[in-house]
Image: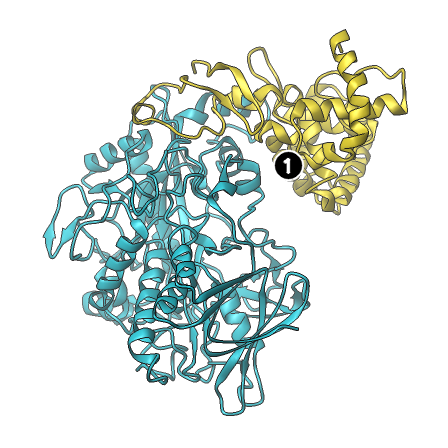
Chain colours: A cyan, B yellow
Amino acid sequence: MANEKTDVVIVGVGAAGGIIAAELGKAGMRVIGLERGPRLQTADFDPHDELRYLERMDLRPNPKTTPVTWRPNANAKAAPLGQLNYGNQAGGGTVHYGALSWRFHEDDFRVRSNTIARYGDKALPEGSTVADWPITYADLEPFYDRAEYELGVSGKAGNIGGRKIEGGNIHEAPRQRDYPLPPLLEDQSAVNFAAAAKKIGYHPFSSPRAILSQAYNGRPGCTYCGFCQAFGCHVGAKSSILVTKLPEADSTGNFKLVTGATCYRINTDNSGKATGVSYYGPDGSDNTIEAELVIMAPFIYDNVRLLLLSKTEKFPNGLANSSGQVGKHIMAHIGVRSFAAFDDRHINVYMGPSAQKHTFDDLNADNFDHSGLGFIRGAQISVAAADLAGGPLGAVTRMTPPPGIPRWGAKYRDFISKYYTRYLAITAQTENLPYADTMIDLDPNVRDHYGLPAPRMTYDWRKPGEQKRIAYMLNKVEEVAHAMGASLVWRSPTGNGSPGAHHQGGARMGSDPKDSVVNKYGQTWDIPNLFVVGSANHVTMAGFNPTLTIQALAFMTADAIVKRYKDHPGPLV
Amino acid sequence: MSEHDETRRTFLKGAAVGVGAVAGAGLVPEALAAEAKAGHDHLAAPAAAAMAAGEHHGAFFNDEDAKTVAAFAERLMPSAPGKPGAKDADALNYIDLALMGPYADQQDFYRRGLAQLETYCMKAHGNSFRRLPGDKQDAVIAALEDGKADNFTYPSAKAFFDRLRTHTMEGMFSDPVYGGNKDFAGWRLVGFPGAQHSFSPADLKSREAFTSAPMQGLQSRAKTNMRRG
């Protein structure tokens, strides 16, 4: 049983944990990072293998050993999810993600007050728990800027200091300067999508991605191989935490990474202070780290689960849960999709970074008038391969064939043979609202391979407002497909209510300890030396991928710890 | 099998002892995996005839089940002139190896599913799936897909269909290193160039099929450039 002492222990060294580890290490704090999975290297991702990484999800947690269960409502029996869509290695999800790097809109931080101001309070659906964030876009802008420049994000600005720029996202919030790198090259799917979107009157642009369009900080530019979402980058052009902040943390001399380490409890004492964490090592050993500061940075499931599992006599409802809000307000993006296939051109959608290549933002957030539509908020609409997977396995397992074509037999063979190189998918990534009945708690029946209760998600996106938003967006993506001059246009089915991508919430940030778990720095209201960070903090989710916001918040947290907490430990708010 | 292959097989008979279960691990080149298995058969039955393409099995399936799975896969992705199917890709070999490796926890699923399929086919059509004519086989598959084969309990008919479809597709389109996609049959069917390390700005701009490099597999490379699609 190893027992170590350190200044800071960070559980989960991914999008948030990796940034905080490097920044605190640079400030002279001794940091131990616990990571459940291995630490891989760029060389491990060469050559590429679609079966291993896409189908068998080699960079994700194993749902058999670390199950997460789901049920649509509190009366249904929960069953383990077949796939877990988050990272399982040092660098976390940034190793395999599609690297979409969005700043949220100004209005994404103020959904409640802006909705009421524009549409009245009846526009907020019954049962929803929409709230404003305790920060504004302006608070976060310097940290968005830092994340883009320190990590390396490619894109074209659409709004510098209020000046709108054609070719960028004209709906984006004002930024202090352009991206550090020019946009990635457009491929055929992007070219076709852009032309059709413009024809309808939208404002398409190259999606900002944490993928280098040219050499930057000693790393080479993207080779457009197409093995991107679900894969590690074989040249290190994807700006994952693995190739950005982890080497930086190493070079401080103050950082130690422990891999194969599964945290099972946050330790607290009778005074109500966190004293460290306990974890199982790769050999099954039981270990404890004593730390002055505990930072929880795993994915939302383990953030919630570990707070609940670490209950004591002093904290009988779990740690940081005096509000009863731990595990509440869970959200997920639901993607709706139209496919388009062409007789007169090849698209070769397997080329280039595979996720959400080109976007228009005109139907996202409150960028359009929702009067009379029966829903609020919108979707980021983009083009890519089926489910962001460019290879043929992705196409045959994730693309439903058009009506009239069965899923097997000679007709299916002829369909996939002709159209695999001639298809693309248009996806609306819809923002879904938080609701009072969406939550994560501990499953009373299912346990992980250590015998600990699995996290159980209770969630169903099929609320009236969500259904209307999805129906609206399906029509819009189909309209774009037709505007491309596609020979075949068809829809993907919308599924059974199960959570889609980018699960968020469970440790909501707020300005009042009574209705939130943490303050704007991710510091728990109840235990000032315990921080809980990552997308668990998100109050609402925007139609945008969450990672850059997770990272900007991590920079903000690290900044506050270094400048204020380090010398004066205590509440930051 | 040609004389040349016979010679190699004799050579590999010794080698196969050394590689042990490597064929099941799916980590050897497809050709070697096939040869290693041939060596194994050779030990068991010195006079055994060589297997035809698309009939490689024995890691998990017995002969009867192998014929059933091969026939099922071939109806899901049938071959036609210029259009390689499941048999050409040797999807059976992929599934057989996977069930002794990463999918070992699905052996019971397959055993029960195949037994239920046999029961259903005997009841509905008076014969085993593998002996039915193609149109009857298609009717059986459609009944499974629609959940209409009512003798299925676990796995359900639909679940068994879905799994066989997924695994057939994996056998068609995964890298040949896993035992299927023989001679890039699946990639040739759809025009996928495999794991290319890069595409040029001209490739990205092109509205034509990609033809400027051979297909690239993990341990193998096609001898000629891509076809015109």
Q: Is residue A128 above or below residue B94?
A: below
Q: Residue furthest front?
A: A253
Q: Quadrant of residue B127?
A: top right
Left or right: A473 as drawn, with respect to A93: left
Which chain's residue wears label 1?
B
Q: Can residue A479 be seen in the rendering of this structure?
A: yes
Q: Nearer the viewer, residue A377 or B92?
A: B92
Left or right: A484 as drawn, with respect to B82: left
Total count of labels: 1
Q: Residue furthest top?
A: B3
Q: Nearer the viewer, residue A41 or A56?
A: A41
Q: Residue furthest bottom?
A: A271
Q: How many residues crowd around disc 1 within 10 Å: few (fewer than 14), some, or many (20 or more)?
A: some
Q: Can residue B151 be seen in the rendering of this structure?
A: no
| Badge 1 element | helix
Left or right: B112 as drawn, with respect to A486: right
x then y, percent, for residue A520: 32, 74
> Which residue is painted at 54% across and 36% down in the image?
A49
Q: Quadrant of the C terminus of chain A?
A: bottom left
x then y, percent, for residue A242: 43, 52
> Which residue is painted at 43% across and 19% down in the image?
B213
Amino acid type assigned to the residue bearing label 1 in the image: Glu
Q: Is residue B31 above or below residue A354?
A: above
Left or right: A101 as drawn, with respect to A156: right
Q: Is residue A376 above or below residue B118?
A: below
x then y, percent, for residue A123: 28, 66
- Dot 1 corresponds to which residue? B145
x then y, percent, for residue A92: 47, 56
Q: Nearer the viewer, residue A564 or A457?
A: A564
Q: Quadrant of the N terminus of chain A?
A: bottom right
